Amino acid sequence: PTTSTAVPTNTTTSATPSTTSLQTNTITEITSTVYTETTAPTTRPPGPEGSATPISVTTSRVTETAPSTEATTLGSPLTSVKTTTVFTLASGITETTSTGTFTGSAVSFPTSTSFTIHSGTTSAEPTLSAVTSFPVLPTTSGTTPTQSFTTTFGTTSSRSTTTPVTTITSSLVSTSTSGPSTVSRSFFYYYFFLSLQIQAGESLWICNCTEAICIEDDKFVLVPVICNPPPKPTCTNGLAPVQVIDADGCCWHWECDCFCTGWGDPHYMTFDGYYYSYQGNCTYVLVEEINKSVDNFGVYIDNYHCDVHDPVSCPRTLIVRHETQEVRIAIVTPNSLQVEVTVNQQEVALPYKKFGLSVYESGINKVVDIPELKMNVTFNGLSFSIRMPYSLFGNNTQGQCGTCNNNTADDCMLPNGNIAENCETMADHWQVVDPSKPQCSPGILPTKGPSTTTGQACEESSICQLLLGSVFEKCHKIVDPEKFYTACVFDSCTLPQLDLECSSLQVYAAICADQGVCLEWRSHTNGVCSYTCPAHKEYRACGPITEITCKSSPEQQNQTETEEVEGCFCPNGTMLYDAGVDVCVTTCGCVGLDDVPREFGEEFTIDCKDCVCLEGGKGIVCEAHKCAEQDEISCDGEGLYQVTEVNSEDLCCPIISCKCNTSFCTTTPPKCDLGFEVYSHIPNGQCCPVYRCVSKGVCVHQNAEFLPNSSVFIDKCQNCYCTNEVNITTQLNVISCEHVPCDTYCEPGYERQPVTGECCGKCVQTKCVIHTSESSILVLSPGEFQNDPYNNCTLYSCVTIHDQLISSTSEITCPAFNEDSCKPGTVTFLPNGCCKTCTPLDSSTPCSVRERKDFIVYQGCYSETRVDLTECEGTCGTFSLYSAEANSLEHSCSCCREEKTSVKEVKLKCPNGNTQTYQYVYVESCSCLDTECEISESRESRSTEESDRESALNRIKRAISLT
């Protein structure tokens, strides 16, 4: 803008511009500009490029114009500010003049101001000033050359064309033709400095990263902070350095965060990136301060042997102590990602926040965050990480995580400050007392250092190969995978059954995500390293580090996070209700203790309270559930009592009713006769029943009940059944019977005989039934024998032995017969009808042994072949003569009988398949021996049974052997 007239002064100066590089951040600012009018025209001579040309202003009258909009290119948040301001306090008249330019993001708008303030007057008068130069000592990060600024008294200079010059002349009372007067920032500085008592040479910091230095007498110079970006260092732990604001809040510098991690069985990466493995199974210090600045601060690890066969360890519990709190994150089941959190030995729900410490979930990790220390600790059961700022903990850490100073040489430091030859040995010395592990004693070291190698060649795991392949290729240039690959091979060879190699991939992927490279890797492990989420969530390899919830503020919801983590997240289209409520919702309403999402305005009943989901306030508002009124009931009467029942339609409103308990009744049921039963009924409004005996409508016989049309057994000779006819007298049904018809026919050899319990008797076998070879049937009574009708040489017989009918078949063997030695006409058959006999030509046959072959049959058993049988045969002198003297016949009897015998044995086969040995008499020689002619009475005295049996056998024998 230009003024209508301008009066130049006789003094001009130039200001050296700042050499600070500017970045291209553009902000639009509003600047108020005040112009003065004079009677003589003035001109502004052009200044050289890069210089500021002062403009003189005659304050004859003050006119303020409307604000104008101008774009200014500013530097980064820590770009330097260049300001030159001088305040002059004159005797009698108070006057201030300020020249210079404010630049940088800390300055609300670029300005160059000049003040002339008079006391006791409302008019402005011109002033005349000399020029004075003051050296400026800027504060820089890194190496920045010293800049000098020029201040002018009574003039205002501008800085190049990139910063417009605005001149404001103001008084305590100003007159404006276009609106109210504008008091600039220098006006504020003026009154600010008047209120301070500062000696020459002293300084103080004011806003916008500017230092005010007292020169002399109420004269101050404003020195801006000039920042140049320092060179970017390399962190030995492989992570990218971070920008950290300087203590003055103006500039920044690079720092390497203290980052320590451990995983597997277990492997450690110290704060400075030194890798080692350690298999101790006690509790150890991960990090503590060397010089204590925080009360009761430390991080500890509790390891355990995760395999019974190999002496390898895995992390079990991560312990964080801070002032009055001790947080323990412990695994629930070995080698899993399921953990529980306790604070001071009490289980807590997440998120937890108290006394400057918070615990929350981030993906698969549980995170302990201490904002005051700008540190966080994560643990997921398989791995842990500790991140601490170098500005607070640099060169002040000790433990198994080493010393944080971006130098691995002292990472294996012992508690006494010495450096161990390796970190495996160092790790033993950081053991702490743990009452739960009495076998661990700090100070007693193992006789042999733990082995960090598998001890034998092992086939390279395909899972570990993923670290070096294309799956993680995008991260290789940012984080070196070699140490993680070494750990993975060790785990897969040492404990192949635990799938611990997945932890190496998991930690590497987490560090890559922390450095801005998020990778999906679990899908390439063929299910070995899969991660299972709850049914209402889905797995994502790259999810937000802080999940947006319905309770997140608008700033949080609009915030774009660059860091990502893997974990279980709500599906697309849904949102987590709150950090402590693991419920995914489609619309943000309310979620109560039942974890059921509700929409705003929805009414529901829970825990016997009528609730409504309201937007704002507590969300869910409840009042006692109202039940419908019930009529009063009386439970008077025997057996009745009052009960309260659950109402199926409204579980919160029980139903009061009368119940009956018959055990309280005094009347007992009667005992009814057979065929009758107890009938009871309860009158309306009563509990105890009334009893009486009524007929069942059945028949009764011998203490048994029979239903109508069912058979009733009385005896075998009658067919009886129960009818539907009722006997009026007994009130029982009538039984009707009919006699059973009898069958009198019996098979041949059987006779019907009466049997006890049988109404028609029974056919009983009384004779032997023999089937001949010609298919004819012979029926023989016991003791009877008969020749075959078609063959007289076959003889059938029937005997009774022990009431058992036994039939036998015998073949007759005839003796040798020579018809030529017979007297003619004397040849006849023997009585058996089979063998022939005759009168020999010489009838006198001496007594001799005759041999023959035949079967032997005994008690139904028979010989399988014919056996040799002998017998005596022949004539002896036998006669009967009359004796006159005795007047009787005198008998002389002589028999052809055995003279010498022997006993022989033969095997007999029985019908049941058994065999028995049978002995028979074999005649060796025969002779005529005298014998009595009368039968002895003693022989007649044998038992009838033996006689009958022997008689039957003898008859058979005679029939067979008769010649």
Image (cartoon, helix red, strand yellow):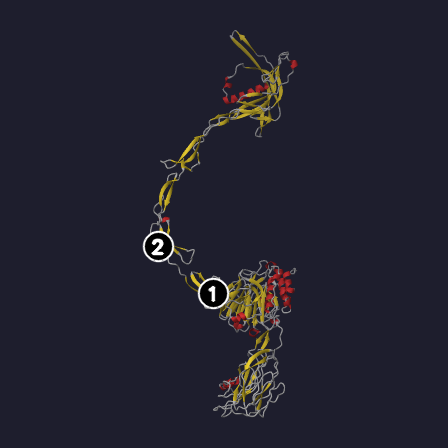
Left or right: 723, with 337 as reference point: left
Q: Which disc number belongs to residue 525?
A: none
Residue 775: percent from left, percent from top: 59, 24
Q: Are marks 2 and 1 in contact (CB under 8 Å)?
A: no
Q: Is residue 518 above or below residue 722?
A: below
From the viewer's side, name the closer residue of 796 and 668. Answer: 668
- Looking at the figure, which quarter contains the N terminus? bottom right
| Depth check, front residue: 941 or 677 | 677
Q: Residue at label 1?
A: 600
- Image x and y of residue 419, in percent: 60, 71
Query: Is residue 670 in view from this perspective?
Result: no
Q: Which mark sits nearer the N-terminus, 2 or 1?
A: 1
How many C-alpha atoms fall within 10 Å of the one at disc 2: few (<14), some, or many (≥20)?
few
- Residue type at mark 2? Ile
Task: Report the label total.
Answer: 2
Q: 391 or 750: which is nearer to us?
A: 750
Judging by the rendered image, the residue that carries numbered circle 2 is 633
State the image quarter where residue 314 is shown: bottom right
